Amino acid sequence: MADHNALPLVVLAEKFASLPGIGMKSAQRLAYHVMSMEDAAVEDFAKALLDAKRNVRCCKCCQNLTEREICPICSDDERDKGIICVVESPKDVTAFERTREYCGVYHVLHGLLSPMDGVTPDKLRFKELLARISEGGVREVIMATNPTVEGDATAMYAAGLLKPLGIKVTRLAFGLPVGGILEYADEVTLYKALENRNDM
């Protein structure tokens, strides 16, 4: 933003621009929009940010985001606890739940292996996944990471950990486009990818 803008407005735009997918022009529009809002609406917006940050945590079981100790999916007795779908992020859980076809549970890694970026296995939730497996009752683990270099590397690493334990490890069928992102896939594509998953 130009030097003639008030410093707090410039800082606000820079904060918006630091969010993923928001360029500086969009950030400036958002900053100006905030200035046109009523004080009460701005306070509600700020409160929503703080409430989410303070009250949302990782489920002790699957590592998905929740405000409870155990998320509603893990708490649901109708879900098949013998099938775990391993995903990169909570956004991917939401994408699969939109299909209304998957009846198992999830495990969120909170990232993908990327040694170049300093993301090593100890930075992801593999330890928690192995702890769940050690409790018994798991028949299959579906590796539902994105079909990218990092996603494939993460899936292969997990398969190497799980196969010696006698767990069936499958990978989503590549009905999903290579290089695609799960959260943007439509429900039918995700359902077909689940239905046609392959052994690893």
Image: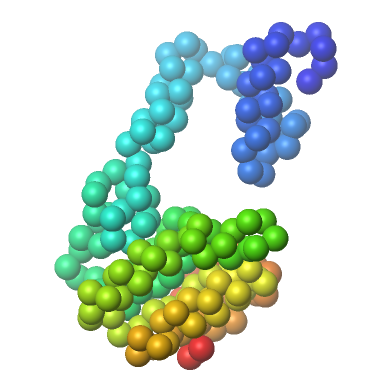
Residue most extreme to the left:
77
> Is 61 above or below relative to 145?
above
Q: Residue at x 36, y 57 (%)?
A: 63
Q: Position of residue 167 (x, y in %)?
A: 36, 86
Q: Residue at x 28, y 55 (%)?
A: 60
Q: Position of residue 102 (x, y in %)?
A: 36, 73
Q: Residue at x 59, y 58 (%)?
A: 119
> Is 110 above or below relative to 153?
above
**Residue 5 visible, this orientation:** yes
**Residue 96 visible, this orientation:** no
For this rendering, which residue is in front, 71 or 135?
135
Q: Position of residue 85 (x, y in %)?
A: 40, 72
Q: How many marks?
A: 0
- The answer to whether residue 146 is left or right of residue 38 is right
> Is 49 above or below relative to 177?
above
Q: Quadrant of residue 127?
A: bottom left
Which quarter shows the N terminus?
A: top right
For this rendering, which residue is in front, 27 or 88?
88
Q: What colour scheme does the image use?
A: rainbow
Q: Position of residue 112 (x, y in %)?
A: 56, 63
Q: Quadrant of residue 33?
A: top right
Q: Residue at x 49, y 73 (%)?
A: 144
> Is 37 above or below relative to 136?
above
